[in-house]
Image (spheres, rainbow, N blue to C red):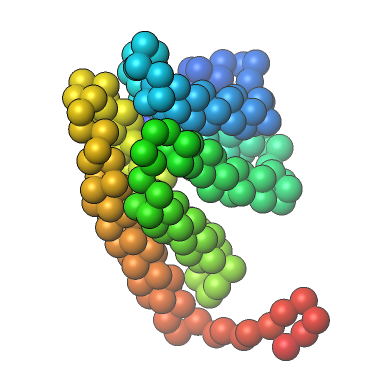
Amino acid sequence: MLYLQKGNFQKVVRWMAGAWMSANQATVLGLCFVVLTAFGFYVGLTYGKYQWLLLLVPVFLVLRMAMNALDGMLAREYDTGSVAGELFNEGLDIVGDTICYGCLFFIPNPPHLSLTLFLILAWMAEYVGVLGKGLPGGVRRHETFLGGKPDRAVWMGGLALLLYFFPSRVEDIAAYLIIVSFFVFLTSIVRVRKILIASEDESYESYTWIGK
């Protein structure tokens, strides 16, 4: 649902790019914040004296979202968009989520099953969203039910804050991720429904690179 505010968010963060930042630079900075997010989660939950790093995780996630909004906006503004750029951007979205949150596999007593479920459902939600562009209707689906990429950033930033202020709740990470996974799953359902609605009365032909 936060994606509906993307236009307003872009207006807020546009000043960060000034006149010096290119779309590629925004993408690289976004990747840096992905790594910093993973670093903050892992070190903050593994080494007690560095627990304060959890406070920075929401900041890194917001900055990652800012760079993600800026790269596409700058590509359009400077007319530097390309097929390769879009492929990289879409791929980096899901790889970025995997790095940001997959680091939880390596903390003490990791939530293996719930984290695996969460990441698989996140991959599915983004894959379904991308499918919308190649099917009748031709639109990349961003609709969410509290489970899109920006929503996931809010959920996980909130988790970092929760674990900083209430360290004993680390044992509840698994339950927390299951709740978030439910919303991510609903996001995929919403996107599938939107694809089907958009394809109504549109012709469809199945084919592969070798033909029909």
Q: Residue furthest bottom?
A: 212
Q: Could you say where residue 188 lies in the image, as x and y percent from the top left?
A: 38, 63
Number of labels in the image equals 0
Identified at 21% across, 21% down, the residue is 165
Indicate whether 49 appears above or below 200.
above
Residue 206 or residue 47, whichever sits in front:
47
Asked whether, in this view, residue 152 is left or right of residue 87, the answer is: left
Identified at 73% across, 48% down, the residue is 84
Residue 1 or residue 10, whichever sits in front:
1
Asked whether, in this view, residue 200 is left or right of residue 76, the answer is: left
Asked whether, in this view, residue 50 is left or right of residue 95, the answer is: left
Q: Is residue 151 visible?
A: yes
Indicate whether 128 appears above or below 146.
below
Q: Residue furthest right?
A: 210
Asked whether, in this view, residue 179 is left or right of residue 35, the answer is: left
Q: Could you say where residue 47 lies in the image, as x and y percent from the top left?
A: 40, 19
Identified at 33% across, 65% down, the residue is 190
Give residue 35's quadrant in the image. Answer: top right
Instruction: Pick the quarter of the image with the C terminus.
Output: bottom right
Q: Could you say where residue 34 lies in the image, as x and y percent from the top left?
A: 52, 31
Q: Is residue 144 visible?
A: no
Q: Could you say where residue 182 lies in the image, as x and y percent from the top left?
A: 27, 58
Indicate whether 49 appears above or below 62.
above
Q: Residue furthest front?
A: 109
Identified at 26% across, 21% down, the residue is 164
Residue 168 or residue 93, whichever sits in front:
168
